[in-house]
Image (spheres, rainbow, N blue to C red):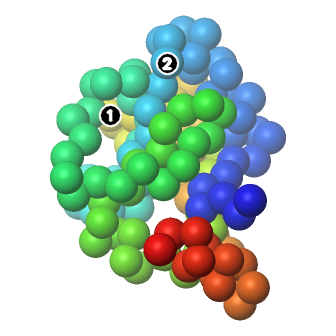
Amino acid sequence: MIERVTATDAALELIDKLKDKHGPLMFHQSGGCCDGSSPMCYPDGDLMIGKQDLLLGEIGSSPFYINKKQYEYWKHTQLIIDVVDGRGGMFSLEGVEGKRFLSRSRAFTKEEAAELQSIER
């Protein structure tokens, strides 16, 4: 099965560390103002998910949401969540660890795109 969102080993290690400290987590792909397009990490339930948000998948057994408008820009790509050194979004849990989550992407192949379209109909 093709995943719309996945994570690197480094990101999964950080997710496990954050889970140990904060319990279950959730992610939301930011689309804007404060943190550009950074994936934001919160304790599960701390961010109100609305009708404009889509569940894209899971990383590290944590739900990963994206705004519908942002999804329209990125629906042809697989999001690959990575982690790098540095301070990220001030509201995202990983900031105090001296790390920040980062979204990378790759375009789906024609075959993957066709498979996703057939599944999502």
Residue located at (57% from left, 20% from top): 18
Relative to 114, is 74 above or below?
Answer: above
The quadrant where residue 110 appears:
bottom right
Q: CA distance from mark 2 to mark 1?
A: 16 Å
Q: Nearer the viewer, residue 54 or 66?
A: 54
Relative to 72, is 3 above or below?
Answer: above
Lateral position of residue 49 relative to residue 64, left or right? left
The quadrant where residue 113 appears:
bottom right
Residue located at (60% from left, 56% from top): 5
Relative to 2, is 50 above or below?
Answer: above
Q: Nearer the viewer, residue 59 or 14?
A: 59
Q: Earlier in the sequence, mark 2 or mark 1?
A: 2
Rendering coords of residue 24 (x, y %): 49, 18
Residue located at (48% from left, 45% from top): 64
Q: Is the N terminus in the top left, top right, bottom left or bottom right quadrant?
A: bottom right
Alpha-carbon neighbours of circle 1 within 10 Å: few (<14), some, or many (≥20)? few
Q: Secondary structure at mark 2?
A: loop
Mark drawn on residue 91:
1
Rendering coords of residue 75 (x, y %): 49, 75
Alpha-carbon neighbours of circle 2 within 10 Å: few (<14), some, or many (≥20)? some
Q: How many marks?
A: 2
